Image (cartoon, rainbow, N blue to C red):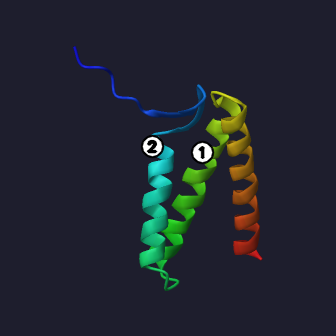
């Protein structure tokens, strides 16, 4: 029988990375679209909004439901960076 595909990146049995989940994929795609249309257009604005919302959802899920302390800290740091990024975009 075939062995299951390993999807977790572990260091000494500690999960530090996994395949991206849907909110993170959406953030990656939105960031790519924003980078390709960085002219201040409506598409650029919508892509950046989708990026921030998707990244916020992913970061919250990691901070609240991460499998270990590293993943929870990663989510908390990402939430803080999203707040800083939005504050800079507004101001």
Residue 81 lies, with reference to residue 58, above or below; the image says below
Residue 14: image location, x then y, percent: 62, 29
Q: Is residue 47 left or right of residue 89?
A: left
Helix, strand, or loop for circle 2?
helix
Residue ranking furthest to the bottom? 39
Crowdedness near tag 2: few (<14), some (14–19) or many (≥20) residues, C-alpha within 10 Å: few
Instruction: Give the mark nearest the N terminus, 2 or 1.
Output: 2
Residue 22 in which image quadrant:
top left
- Name the residue: 70% across, 32% down: 64
- Name the residue: 47% across, 75% down: 35
Instruction: Tally the marks.
Output: 2
Q: Nearer the viewer, residue 5 or 86?
A: 5
Helix, strand, or loop for circle 1?
helix
- Name the residue: 55% across, 32% down: 10
Crowdedness near tag 1: few (<14), some (14–19) or many (≥20) residues, C-alpha within 10 Å: some
Residue 43 in which image quadrant:
bottom left
Residue 20: image location, x then y, percent: 47, 43
Residue matched to label 2: 22
Residue 16: image location, x then y, percent: 59, 37
Q: Is residue 32 left or right of residue 57?
A: left
Q: Is residue 47 left or right of residue 79?
A: left
Tag 2 and tag 1, C-beta contact below 8 Å: no
Q: Nearer the viewer, residue 71 or 54?
A: 71
Residue 22 lies, with reference to residue 10, above or below; the image says below
Q: Quadrant of the C terminus?
A: bottom right
> Which label number is shown at residue 18?
none
Residue ranking furthest to the top? 1
Residue matched to label 1: 57
- Name the residue: 73% across, 32% down: 69
Q: Quadrant of the N terminus?
A: top left
């Amino acid at each position: 029988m075939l062995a299951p595909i390993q999807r977790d990146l572990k260091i000494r049995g500690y999960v530090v990375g996994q395949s991206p989940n849907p909110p993170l994929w959406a953030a990656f795609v939105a960031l790519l679209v924003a980078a390709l249309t960085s002219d201040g257009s409506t598409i650029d604005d919508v892509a950046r909004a989708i990026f921030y919302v998707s990244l916020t959802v992913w970061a919250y899920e990691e901070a609240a439901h991460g499998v270990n302390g590293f993943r929870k800290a990663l989510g908390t740091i990402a939430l803080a960076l999203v707040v800083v990024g939005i504050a800079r975009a507004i101001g």
